[in-house]
Amino acid sequence: MRVGVNKEIKNHEYRVGLTPGAVREYAAHGHEVLVETGAGTGIAADDAAYVAAGARIVPTAQEVFAEAQMIVKVKEPQPSEWVQLREDQILFTYLHLAPDPEQAKGLMASGVTAVAYETVTDRFGGLPLLAPMSEVAGRLSIEAAGAALKAYNGGRGVLLGGVPGVAPARIVVLGGGVVGTHAARMAVGLGAEVTIVDRSIPRLRQLDELFQGRVRTRVSTLEAIEHEISEADAVIGAVLIPGASAPKLVTRAMLGHMKRRAVLVDVAIDQGGCFETSHATTHADPTYEVDGVIHYCVANMPGAVPLTSSHALNNATLPYGLALADKGVAACDDDPGLKAGLNVQGGRIVNEAVAESLR
Ligand SMILES: NC(=O)c1ccc[n+]([C@@H]2O[C@H](COP(=O)([O-])OP(=O)(O)OC[C@H]3O[C@@H](n4cnc5c(N)ncnc54)[C@H](O)[C@@H]3O)[C@@H](O)[C@H]2O)c1
């Protein structure tokens, strides 16, 4: 198959659909890979690296769209990209169509077959192509908290790990899933005092085993959340209820019980946020203050580390992408998890949950 990779054009998006390492795998499977010149700039992979991996460099995105039978991207296509997609093409990328009816219409009108990373499932019911970005965001959340706690950024001036004789920072992680676990790992590694709050007792049992006594765990109740956040230097919001907006676990009134210039990092902001006072921010201007509490609510945290994120994403997408390139859309018939990724086909939304939320 002829596989195309174009340079991402969404604002501040530096990741790339295929790394040179992934291109080499596609080439080894006998596929031809077209890469737009400069597509790998954000991950320090120049055109020569792609050529060495077996790709052909083409000068414009238009040529990639015109020639490729499958397009592999990172972010959802932008309006100038929808119009270049065709019914004999497969699009493999993050789409997040549910809150984006305009894009949904654009993709349906193009006739393209679109497979969305975020709805591909594995045999345990997990989301294998979403997990790597949650790992990145979870780990980054502690760096973000550490930065926001610095006095020159308006924070309390607490060092996460403390020093001998001075207590470390207290970090509360709301939601002990993928984001929460990776946040806790980083926080524990830096020597902070960590509490994970989750509504699932089996999950808390697993975390208790995993961290061998290095974190405290608590069941998510109003009382537990109120108490924990009142003592926290930083709170990481990492809850998810699949298919729904994030629950508002911390209300504005609760901010009054928090330490002044403590930090809230709302990783769940892409699902609407789990703090009542959250609104999405960007890497260019990541924080703001409400009632003396610093809020960090960047909606695309992994975009800050495109090199790590692109490799993590490619590690996860590669087997699925290769299956699509090898067999075409028929690959979905062999793998129900990949089939769950099918969002648009034949001018219709074919994923039931996505169709439902667009109705
Ligand atoms: N901002 C970003 O750049 C970015 C990047 C990646 C992921 N995310 C978001 O981070 C969030 C978490 O993702 P994840 O992969 O860790 O999800 P996950 O499903 O692995 O974990 C979510 C956890 O939240 C828990 N939970 C649900 N309701 C709760 C409640 N009321 N109280 C306490 N815990 C509760 C669940 O039991 C689960 O353990 C999602 O909204 C995801 O979209 C954001």
Image: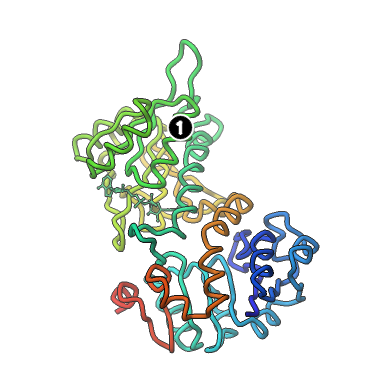
**Total marks in image:** 1
Q: Residue at x 35, y 76 (%)?
A: 351
Ligand 1 within 8 angstroms of badge 1 C-beta: no
Residue at the extreme right of the image, as rendered: 48
Q: Is residue 120 above or below residue 66?
A: above
Q: Residue at x 33, y 47 (%)?
A: 275
Residue 312 position, x and y percent, is: 56, 53
Neighbourhood count class around disc 1 (C-alpha, 10 Å): few under 14, some 14–19, many 20 upward: many
Tell me if 83 is positioned left or right of 109 in this view: right
Q: Is residue 67 above or below residue 254?
A: below
Label 1, secondary structure: give it.
Answer: helix
- Between 24 and 275, the one nearer to me in the picture: 24
The quarter of the picture where the N terminus appears is bottom right
The quarter of the picture where the C terminus appears is bottom left
Residue 48 position, x and y percent, is: 80, 62
Residue 357 position, x and y percent, is: 30, 73
The quarter of the picture where residue 234 lies is: top left
The quarter of the picture where residue 25 lies is: bottom right
Q: Residue at x 43, y 58 (%)?
A: 128
Tell me if 274 is positioned left or right of 313 in this view: left
Tell me if 329 is positioned left or right of 176 in this view: right
Colour style of the rendered protein structure: rainbow
Disc 1 marks a residue whose amino acid type is Ala
Q: Is residue 83 above or below residue 285?
A: below
Q: Residue at x 50, y 55 (%)?
A: 300
Q: Which residue is mark 1?
A: 187
- Between 14 and 344, the one nearer to me in the picture: 344
Residue 240 position, x and y percent, is: 32, 53
Q: Is residue 125 above or below residue 69?
A: above
Tell me if 244 is positioned left or right of 106 in this view: left
